[in-house]
Image (cartoon, coloured by chain):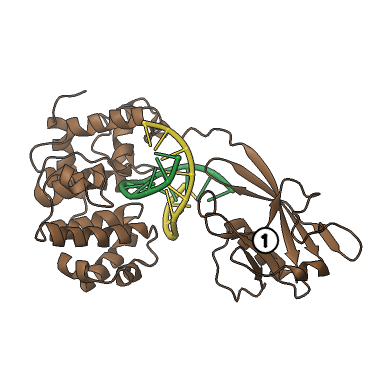
Chain colours: A brown, B green, C yellow
DNA sequence: AAAACGGGGAC
DNA sequence: GTCCCAGTTTT
Protein backbone atom coordinates (compact mmCIF):
# COMPACT_ATOMS: atom_id res chain seq x y z
CA UNK A 1 0.00 0.00 0.00
CA UNK A 2 1.46 3.41 -0.85
CA UNK A 3 2.27 5.31 2.34
CA UNK A 4 0.83 8.77 1.90
CA UNK A 5 -0.68 10.89 -0.70
CA UNK A 6 1.50 13.09 -2.79
CA UNK A 7 1.13 12.17 -6.43
CA UNK A 8 -2.43 10.91 -6.35
CA UNK A 9 -4.01 13.71 -4.36
CA UNK A 10 -1.95 16.37 -6.09
CA UNK A 11 -2.88 15.14 -9.55
CA UNK A 12 -6.51 14.79 -8.57
CA UNK A 13 -6.68 18.30 -7.16
CA UNK A 14 -5.07 19.71 -10.29
CA UNK A 15 -7.71 18.00 -12.38
CA UNK A 16 -10.47 19.18 -10.04
CA UNK A 17 -9.30 22.80 -10.18
CA UNK A 18 -9.32 22.74 -13.93
CA UNK A 19 -12.18 20.40 -14.86
CA UNK A 20 -14.23 19.56 -11.77
CA UNK A 21 -17.64 20.90 -10.82
CA UNK A 22 -17.46 23.76 -8.34
CA UNK A 23 -20.87 25.35 -8.54
CA UNK A 24 -23.14 22.66 -7.16
CA UNK A 25 -25.58 24.16 -4.64
CA UNK A 26 -23.96 22.45 -1.65
CA UNK A 27 -20.42 23.40 -2.68
CA UNK A 28 -20.77 27.14 -2.33
CA UNK A 29 -21.77 27.39 1.33
CA UNK A 30 -20.23 24.42 3.06
CA UNK A 31 -21.93 24.39 6.43
CA UNK A 32 -22.24 21.03 8.14
CA UNK A 33 -26.01 21.24 7.86
CA UNK A 34 -26.00 21.82 4.11
CA UNK A 35 -23.30 19.23 3.46
CA UNK A 36 -25.16 16.70 5.59
CA UNK A 37 -28.46 17.19 3.74
CA UNK A 38 -26.70 16.97 0.38
CA UNK A 39 -24.78 13.82 1.28
CA UNK A 40 -27.94 12.05 2.45
CA UNK A 41 -29.78 13.05 -0.72
CA UNK A 42 -26.82 11.93 -2.82
CA UNK A 43 -26.94 8.44 -1.38
CA UNK A 44 -28.39 6.29 -4.20
CA UNK A 45 -29.27 9.38 -6.18
CA UNK A 46 -27.50 11.31 -8.89
CA UNK A 47 -26.48 14.94 -8.76
CA UNK A 48 -28.89 16.17 -11.44
CA UNK A 49 -31.84 14.57 -9.66
CA UNK A 50 -30.81 15.92 -6.27
CA UNK A 51 -30.32 19.60 -7.20
CA UNK A 52 -33.99 20.69 -7.32
CA UNK A 53 -34.83 18.69 -4.20
CA UNK A 54 -31.90 20.25 -2.35
CA UNK A 55 -32.89 23.77 -3.32
CA UNK A 56 -36.48 23.20 -2.30
CA UNK A 57 -35.47 21.59 0.97
CA UNK A 58 -33.17 24.46 1.87
CA UNK A 59 -35.86 26.94 0.94
CA UNK A 60 -38.19 25.32 3.45
CA UNK A 61 -35.70 24.25 6.13
CA UNK A 62 -32.83 26.71 6.02
CA UNK A 63 -31.50 25.69 9.42
CA UNK A 64 -31.33 22.55 11.46
CA UNK A 65 -33.62 24.16 14.03
CA UNK A 66 -36.34 24.57 11.43
CA UNK A 67 -35.89 20.97 10.33
CA UNK A 68 -36.01 19.69 13.89
CA UNK A 69 -39.22 21.63 14.53
CA UNK A 70 -40.94 20.30 11.42
CA UNK A 71 -43.55 17.56 11.23
CA UNK A 72 -42.25 14.33 9.75
CA UNK A 73 -44.97 14.56 7.12
CA UNK A 74 -43.59 17.89 5.91
CA UNK A 75 -40.14 16.37 5.56
CA UNK A 76 -41.50 13.36 3.71
CA UNK A 77 -43.49 15.63 1.46
CA UNK A 78 -40.30 17.38 0.32
CA UNK A 79 -38.76 13.96 -0.24
CA UNK A 80 -41.56 12.63 -2.44
CA UNK A 81 -40.04 11.22 -5.62
CA UNK A 82 -36.50 10.85 -4.27
CA UNK A 83 -37.11 7.35 -2.97
CA UNK A 84 -35.73 5.52 0.05
CA UNK A 85 -37.97 7.42 2.42
CA UNK A 86 -36.19 6.02 5.44
CA UNK A 87 -33.50 8.58 4.59
CA UNK A 88 -35.97 11.39 5.27
CA UNK A 89 -37.19 9.85 8.51
CA UNK A 90 -33.62 9.32 9.71
CA UNK A 91 -32.69 12.85 8.73
CA UNK A 92 -35.53 14.29 10.75
CA UNK A 93 -34.77 12.11 13.73
CA UNK A 94 -31.09 13.05 13.66
CA UNK A 95 -31.94 16.75 13.41
CA UNK A 96 -34.01 16.51 16.56
CA UNK A 97 -31.24 14.66 18.37
CA UNK A 98 -28.65 17.24 17.38
CA UNK A 99 -30.81 20.20 18.39
CA UNK A 100 -31.83 18.63 21.68
CA UNK A 101 -28.54 17.21 22.85
CA UNK A 102 -25.73 19.20 21.32
CA UNK A 103 -27.05 22.71 21.40
CA UNK A 104 -27.51 22.44 17.64
CA UNK A 105 -23.86 21.86 16.88
CA UNK A 106 -22.81 18.84 14.87
CA UNK A 107 -20.57 16.14 16.28
CA UNK A 108 -17.09 16.84 14.95
CA UNK A 109 -15.72 13.33 14.94
CA UNK A 110 -16.40 10.40 12.63
CA UNK A 111 -17.56 8.34 15.61
CA UNK A 112 -19.92 11.07 16.78
CA UNK A 113 -21.40 11.52 13.34
CA UNK A 114 -21.89 7.79 12.90
CA UNK A 115 -24.06 7.62 16.01
CA UNK A 116 -26.69 9.59 14.13
CA UNK A 117 -29.35 7.66 12.23
CA UNK A 118 -28.65 7.45 8.52
CA UNK A 119 -24.95 8.23 8.74
CA UNK A 120 -22.49 5.42 8.09
CA UNK A 121 -18.72 5.61 7.80
CA UNK A 122 -18.57 7.03 4.30
CA UNK A 123 -21.21 9.69 4.84
CA UNK A 124 -19.57 10.64 8.15
CA UNK A 125 -16.22 10.97 6.36
CA UNK A 126 -17.71 13.18 3.67
CA UNK A 127 -19.39 15.53 6.14
CA UNK A 128 -16.29 15.76 8.34
CA UNK A 129 -13.91 16.31 5.43
CA UNK A 130 -16.01 18.71 3.37
CA UNK A 131 -17.55 20.84 6.09
CA UNK A 132 -14.90 20.62 8.83
CA UNK A 133 -11.64 19.90 7.04
CA UNK A 134 -11.12 16.72 9.06
CA UNK A 135 -8.81 14.32 7.27
CA UNK A 136 -11.19 11.40 6.80
CA UNK A 137 -11.43 8.92 3.94
CA UNK A 138 -14.71 8.21 2.18
CA UNK A 139 -15.79 5.16 0.19
CA UNK A 140 -18.97 5.72 -1.71
CA UNK A 141 -19.88 4.00 -4.97
CA UNK A 142 -17.84 6.45 -7.04
CA UNK A 143 -14.72 6.04 -4.94
CA UNK A 144 -15.02 2.26 -4.90
CA UNK A 145 -15.03 2.26 -8.68
CA UNK A 146 -12.09 4.67 -9.02
CA UNK A 147 -9.91 2.80 -6.53
CA UNK A 148 -10.80 -0.68 -7.76
CA UNK A 149 -9.65 0.35 -11.23
CA UNK A 150 -6.63 2.33 -10.08
CA UNK A 151 -5.23 -0.69 -8.23
CA UNK A 152 -6.97 -3.58 -10.01
CA UNK A 153 -8.79 -4.68 -6.89
CA UNK A 154 -10.72 -7.79 -7.83
CA UNK A 155 -13.98 -8.93 -6.33
CA UNK A 156 -17.30 -7.35 -5.53
CA UNK A 157 -16.69 -4.17 -3.48
CA UNK A 158 -19.43 -5.01 -0.98
CA UNK A 159 -17.70 -8.22 -0.02
CA UNK A 160 -16.08 -7.59 3.35
CA UNK A 161 -12.52 -8.50 2.38
CA UNK A 162 -12.68 -6.36 -0.75
CA UNK A 163 -14.25 -3.48 1.09
CA UNK A 164 -11.50 -3.66 3.69
CA UNK A 165 -8.81 -3.37 1.02
CA UNK A 166 -10.58 -0.42 -0.56
CA UNK A 167 -10.89 1.38 2.78
CA UNK A 168 -7.17 0.90 3.34
CA UNK A 169 -6.36 2.37 -0.05
CA UNK A 170 -8.78 5.23 0.50
CA UNK A 171 -7.16 5.94 3.84
CA UNK A 172 -3.65 5.90 2.39
CA UNK A 173 -4.51 8.25 -0.48
CA UNK A 174 -6.40 10.85 1.54
CA UNK A 175 -4.22 13.95 1.86
CA UNK A 176 -3.68 16.25 4.84
CA UNK A 177 -3.98 19.34 2.68
CA UNK A 178 -7.19 20.44 1.02
CA UNK A 179 -9.06 17.37 2.18
CA UNK A 180 -12.37 19.13 1.54
CA UNK A 181 -11.61 19.66 -2.15
CA UNK A 182 -10.01 16.24 -2.42
CA UNK A 183 -13.17 14.58 -1.13
CA UNK A 184 -15.39 16.34 -3.63
CA UNK A 185 -12.83 15.76 -6.37
CA UNK A 186 -12.66 12.00 -6.05
CA UNK A 187 -16.44 11.71 -6.10
CA UNK A 188 -16.56 14.05 -9.09
CA UNK A 189 -13.97 12.02 -10.97
CA UNK A 190 -16.00 8.88 -10.44
CA UNK A 191 -19.24 10.56 -11.43
CA UNK A 192 -17.99 12.30 -14.57
CA UNK A 193 -14.88 10.47 -15.88
CA UNK A 194 -14.50 7.08 -14.24
CA UNK A 195 -18.10 6.14 -14.89
CA UNK A 196 -19.64 2.70 -14.54
CA UNK A 197 -19.88 2.15 -18.27
CA UNK A 198 -18.00 3.89 -21.06
CA UNK A 199 -15.49 5.72 -18.85
CA UNK A 200 -13.67 8.66 -20.44
CA UNK A 201 -10.18 7.34 -19.80
CA UNK A 202 -8.65 9.72 -22.36
CA UNK A 203 -9.72 12.64 -20.14
CA UNK A 204 -8.62 11.06 -16.87
CA UNK A 205 -5.72 12.50 -14.91
CA UNK A 206 -4.70 8.94 -14.04
CA UNK A 207 -4.77 7.47 -17.51
CA UNK A 208 -1.07 6.60 -17.28
CA UNK A 209 -1.08 5.41 -13.63
CA UNK A 210 -4.31 3.46 -13.53
CA UNK A 211 -3.41 -0.21 -13.35
CA UNK A 212 -6.63 -1.36 -14.98
CA UNK A 213 -6.05 1.08 -17.83
CA UNK A 214 -2.41 -0.02 -18.22
CA UNK A 215 -3.58 -3.60 -18.58
CA UNK A 216 -6.57 -2.67 -20.71
CA UNK A 217 -8.87 -4.27 -18.17
CA UNK A 218 -10.94 -1.29 -17.09
CA UNK A 219 -14.23 -3.07 -17.75
CA UNK A 220 -13.30 -5.81 -15.29
CA UNK A 221 -13.40 -3.48 -12.31
CA UNK A 222 -15.10 -3.16 -9.96
CA UNK A 223 -16.00 -6.84 -9.83
CA UNK A 224 -19.63 -7.78 -10.13
CA UNK A 225 -21.65 -9.25 -7.40
CA UNK A 226 -21.25 -13.02 -7.56
CA UNK A 227 -24.50 -14.21 -8.95
CA UNK A 228 -25.25 -17.51 -7.45
CA UNK A 229 -27.89 -19.37 -9.38
CA UNK A 230 -30.93 -18.66 -7.34
CA UNK A 231 -33.13 -21.50 -6.19
CA UNK A 232 -36.53 -21.69 -7.81
CA UNK A 233 -39.52 -22.25 -5.59
CA UNK A 234 -43.02 -22.70 -6.84
CA UNK A 235 -46.40 -22.03 -5.37
CA UNK A 236 -50.02 -22.05 -6.50
CA UNK A 237 -51.99 -18.90 -5.76
CA UNK A 238 -55.76 -19.10 -5.76
CA UNK A 239 -57.92 -16.37 -7.16
CA UNK A 240 -61.14 -17.20 -5.37
CA UNK A 241 -64.08 -15.14 -6.56
CA UNK A 242 -67.50 -14.84 -5.02
CA UNK A 243 -70.62 -14.23 -7.04
CA UNK A 244 -69.93 -10.49 -6.98
CA UNK A 245 -66.60 -11.11 -8.66
CA UNK A 246 -64.64 -10.02 -5.57
CA UNK A 247 -61.35 -11.79 -4.85
CA UNK A 248 -60.47 -13.26 -1.47
CA UNK A 249 -57.23 -11.90 0.00
CA UNK A 250 -55.38 -13.02 3.10
CA UNK A 251 -53.31 -10.75 5.31
CA UNK A 252 -49.83 -12.16 5.75
CA UNK A 253 -48.02 -12.39 9.09
CA UNK A 254 -46.14 -9.24 10.13
CA UNK A 255 -42.74 -10.86 9.72
CA UNK A 256 -41.17 -12.57 6.75
CA UNK A 257 -41.71 -12.01 3.10
CA UNK A 258 -44.43 -9.48 2.21
CA UNK A 259 -44.94 -8.80 5.91
CA UNK A 260 -48.42 -7.45 6.70
CA UNK A 261 -49.30 -7.16 3.04
CA UNK A 262 -52.36 -8.78 1.54
CA UNK A 263 -51.82 -11.76 -0.74
CA UNK A 264 -53.73 -14.60 -2.35
CA UNK A 265 -54.37 -17.89 -0.53
CA UNK A 266 -51.64 -20.36 -1.44
CA UNK A 267 -50.91 -24.03 -1.63
CA UNK A 268 -48.04 -26.13 -2.88
CA UNK A 269 -49.90 -27.46 -5.92
CA UNK A 270 -52.57 -26.14 -8.27
CA UNK A 271 -54.51 -29.35 -7.72
CA UNK A 272 -54.90 -28.80 -3.96
CA UNK A 273 -56.83 -25.64 -3.19
CA UNK A 274 -56.76 -24.47 0.44
CA UNK A 275 -59.68 -25.64 2.55
CA UNK A 276 -61.59 -22.57 3.58
CA UNK A 277 -65.27 -23.26 4.09
CA UNK A 278 -65.52 -26.62 5.72
CA UNK A 279 -65.87 -28.69 2.64
CA UNK A 280 -63.11 -28.30 0.12
CA UNK A 281 -63.50 -25.94 -2.79
CA UNK A 282 -62.60 -28.22 -5.60
CA UNK A 283 -63.33 -28.43 -9.24
CA UNK A 284 -66.68 -30.06 -8.76
CA UNK A 285 -69.85 -29.33 -10.59
CA UNK A 286 -71.10 -25.74 -10.67
CA UNK A 287 -67.57 -24.42 -10.11
CA UNK A 288 -65.50 -22.69 -12.74
CA UNK A 289 -61.84 -23.39 -12.32
CA UNK A 290 -58.97 -22.57 -14.63
CA UNK A 291 -55.19 -22.37 -14.46
CA UNK A 292 -53.88 -19.04 -15.69
CA UNK A 293 -50.49 -18.21 -17.18
CA UNK A 294 -47.61 -18.85 -14.78
CA UNK A 295 -45.63 -15.82 -13.66
CA UNK A 296 -42.17 -15.60 -12.13
CA UNK A 297 -41.39 -13.21 -9.30
CA UNK A 298 -37.74 -12.79 -8.33
CA UNK A 299 -36.34 -11.88 -4.95
CA UNK A 300 -32.73 -11.22 -4.09
CA UNK A 301 -32.40 -14.81 -2.87
CA UNK A 302 -34.81 -16.92 -4.91
CA UNK A 303 -37.22 -17.05 -7.82
CA UNK A 304 -40.82 -17.83 -7.15
CA UNK A 305 -42.83 -19.44 -9.94
CA UNK A 306 -46.47 -18.75 -9.36
CA UNK A 307 -49.31 -20.72 -10.93
CA UNK A 308 -52.48 -18.72 -10.58
CA UNK A 309 -55.67 -20.74 -10.34
CA UNK A 310 -58.97 -18.96 -10.73
CA UNK A 311 -62.00 -20.47 -9.07
CA UNK A 312 -65.52 -19.14 -8.99
CA UNK A 313 -67.94 -20.91 -6.72
CA UNK A 314 -71.16 -19.94 -4.98
CA UNK A 315 -69.93 -21.67 -1.87
CA UNK A 316 -67.30 -18.95 -1.48
CA UNK A 317 -70.02 -16.46 -0.61
CA UNK A 318 -70.11 -18.11 2.82
CA UNK A 319 -66.70 -16.76 3.73
CA UNK A 320 -66.98 -13.70 5.95
CA UNK A 321 -64.41 -10.91 6.26
CA UNK A 322 -62.24 -10.88 9.38
CA UNK A 323 -58.92 -9.26 10.35
CA UNK A 324 -57.31 -11.86 8.19
CA UNK A 325 -59.64 -12.25 5.23
CA UNK A 326 -60.70 -9.54 2.85
CA UNK A 327 -62.95 -9.48 -0.20
CA UNK A 328 -61.20 -7.31 -2.76
CA UNK A 329 -63.25 -5.65 -5.48
CA UNK A 330 -61.36 -5.58 -8.77
CA UNK A 331 -62.03 -1.87 -9.34
CA UNK A 332 -59.10 -0.90 -7.03
CA UNK A 333 -61.48 1.01 -4.76
CA UNK A 334 -59.78 -0.52 -1.74
CA UNK A 335 -56.44 0.92 -0.70
CA UNK A 336 -54.49 -1.94 0.78
CA UNK A 337 -50.85 -3.02 0.58
CA UNK A 338 -50.53 -5.81 -1.95
CA UNK A 339 -47.63 -8.12 -2.62
CA UNK A 340 -46.19 -7.06 -5.98
CA UNK A 341 -47.08 -10.18 -8.01
CA UNK A 342 -50.58 -10.18 -6.51
CA UNK A 343 -51.10 -6.63 -7.66
CA UNK A 344 -49.99 -7.71 -11.12
CA UNK A 345 -52.31 -10.70 -11.20
CA UNK A 346 -55.29 -8.67 -10.04
CA UNK A 347 -54.58 -5.94 -12.59
CA UNK A 348 -54.48 -8.52 -15.36
CA UNK A 349 -57.70 -10.00 -14.14
CA UNK A 350 -59.43 -6.61 -14.00
CA UNK A 351 -58.30 -5.81 -17.54
CA UNK A 352 -59.66 -9.06 -18.93
CA UNK A 353 -63.05 -8.91 -17.33
C1' DA B 1 -35.05 -7.22 -17.03
C1' DA B 2 -31.13 -6.53 -14.30
C1' DA B 3 -27.73 -3.96 -11.94
C1' DA B 4 -26.35 -0.25 -9.20
C1' DC B 5 -26.65 2.47 -5.09
C1' DG B 6 -25.68 3.26 1.24
C1' DG B 7 -27.39 2.30 5.40
C1' DG B 8 -30.59 0.18 8.95
C1' DG B 9 -32.29 -3.56 11.32
C1' DA B 10 -33.38 -8.46 12.22
C1' DC B 11 -31.31 -12.56 13.12
C1' DG C 1 -21.18 -10.92 11.29
C1' DT C 2 -24.57 -11.86 7.45
C1' DC C 3 -28.79 -11.38 5.14
C1' DC C 4 -32.51 -8.89 3.57
C1' DC C 5 -34.92 -4.72 2.53
C1' DA C 6 -36.20 -0.29 0.31
C1' DG C 7 -37.28 3.01 -4.54
C1' DT C 8 -35.50 5.01 -8.49
C1' DT C 9 -32.37 5.46 -12.45
C1' DT C 10 -29.29 3.52 -15.81
C1' DT C 11 -27.91 0.09 -18.90
Q: Who is closer to the viewer here, A140 or A20?
A: A140
Left or right of residue A248, residue A289 in this image: right
Q: Percent x, y for residue C1?
A: 36, 31
Q: Percent x, y for residue A41?
A: 29, 57
Q: Who is closer to the viewer here, A30 or A214?
A: A30
Q: Percent x, y for residue A214?
A: 33, 26
Quadrant housing the C terminus of chain A: bottom right
Up/down of A28 relative to A235, above or below: below
What residue is shown at x 81% (from left), y 49% (from top)? Answer: A271
Query: To which quarter of the image does residue A78 belong?
Result: bottom left
Query: Number of marks in the image?
Result: 1
Query: To which quarter of the image does residue A190 belong?
Result: top left
Left or right of residue A282, residue A162 in this image: left
Residue most extreme to the front: A278
Left or right of residue A238, residue A13 in this image: left
Quadrant housing the N terminus of chain A: top left
Q: Percent x, y for residue A146?
A: 30, 37
Crowd around label 1: few <14 · some 14–19 · many ≥20 (10 Å): some
What residue is shown at x 30% (from left), y 66% (from top)? Answer: A53
Q: Who is closer to the viewer here, A242 or A226?
A: A242
What residue is shown at x 35% (from left), y 44% (from top)? Answer: A195
Residue most extreme to the right: A285
Residue A24 in view: no
Q: Who is closer to the viewer here, A193 or A4?
A: A4
Up/down of A156 relative to A73, above or below: above
What residue is shown at x 38% (from left), y 27% (from top)? Answer: A154
Up/down of A152 relative to A23, above or below: above
Residue A204 in view: yes
Q: Which chain is mark 1 on?
A: A
Q: Secondary structure at mark 1?
A: helix
Residue at image mark 1: A345
Amino acid sequence: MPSTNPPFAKQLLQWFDEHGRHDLPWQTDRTSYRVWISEIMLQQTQVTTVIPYFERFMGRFATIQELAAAQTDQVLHLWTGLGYYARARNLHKAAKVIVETNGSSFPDTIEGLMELDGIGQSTAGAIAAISMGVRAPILDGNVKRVLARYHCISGWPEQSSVKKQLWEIAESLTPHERVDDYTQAIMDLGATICTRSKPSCQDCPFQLDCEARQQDRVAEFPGKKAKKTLPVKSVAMFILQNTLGEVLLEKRPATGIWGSLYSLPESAKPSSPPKLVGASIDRGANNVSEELQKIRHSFSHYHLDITPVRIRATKLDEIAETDRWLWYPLDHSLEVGLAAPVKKLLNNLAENS
